[in-house]
Each structure stands twice: as structure tokens, then as C-alpha cells.
Amino acid sequence: MQIDNGVRADRIAGAVWRKSGRSAPGGNCVELAALPGGRVAVRNSRFPSGPALVHSREEIAALLGGIKDGEFDGMVTEGALG
């Protein structure tokens, strides 16, 4: 099966989905799964059958680096989204 953006996350055979230990039970979280060839799938934990976004290892590394560096901190403060 071809694994591309938008594939149903529950159709990715063998995917082991992981989410942050900081996630609240039943909360709004994202989950990640390592794919063959080094790519990473991302899904919404509330909709495990929904679409997955597929990114390269480099894209995920850049995102995590930005998160660790605080580049997105302003997006989670009250009123930051509008």
C-alpha cells in the first residue's frame, strides 16, 4: 500500500502510534508513527481513522527543534489565535 498524505491512519499496517506523555486523557492530541524509509505519519488522536499527514524525518526534526527552541510558544497562549 502506498502511504501518502491523506491516507486513513488506521489503514497504515504495522503503525505504532505514540503521543506525548503530557497529553491529557481523552484530550486533543496528535500521535506520530515511524514509517518504513524514515518518514513519519501524524494523526489526530481523537480521530484515529481520520487522515494521516506524512512527513520526512527532516521535516519532523525541524518541527521538534522549533518546539524545543520555543518558536511556537506564542501560539498556545490565551488569545494568540485571534
Image (spheres, helix red, strand yellow):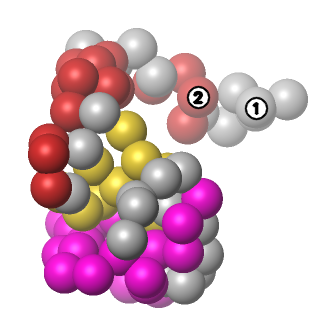
SS at mark 1?
Answer: loop
State the image coordinates of residue 10 (x, y, percent, origin top left). 43, 84
Is 44 drawn above or below residue 79 in the view shown? below
Which residue matches tag 2? 75
Residues at marks 1 and 2, CA–CA distance in whole angstroms: 7 Å
Which mark, by number, is residue 81? 1
State the image coordinates of residue 55 (x, y, percent, origin top left). 37, 39
The stretch of residues the image draws in magenta is 6-31
Queried whether the magenta region covers residue 29, the answer comes back as yes
Q: Does residue 29 appear to the left or right of 7 in the view shown?
A: left
Is 81 drawn above or below residue 47 in the view shown? above
Main SS of the magenta part reads: loop
Queried whether the magenta region covers residue 13, the answer comes back as yes
Residue nearer the viewer, 4 or 49: 4
Q: For the residue marked with disc 2, what is the amino acid?
A: Met
Q: For the residue marked with disc 1, what is the amino acid?
A: Leu
**Neighbours of disc 1 within 10 Å: few (<14), some (14-19), many (20+):** few
Q: Does residue 74 appear to the left or right of 1 in the view shown?
A: right
SS at mark 2?
Answer: helix
Is 57 drawn above or below residue 28 in the view shown? above
Q: Quadrant of residue 71?
A: top left
Residue nearer the viewer, 6 or 22: 6
| Quadrant, the N terminus | bottom left
- Disc 1 to disc 2: CB gap under 8 Å: yes
Please give the count of numbered marks on the rendered protein. Answer: 2
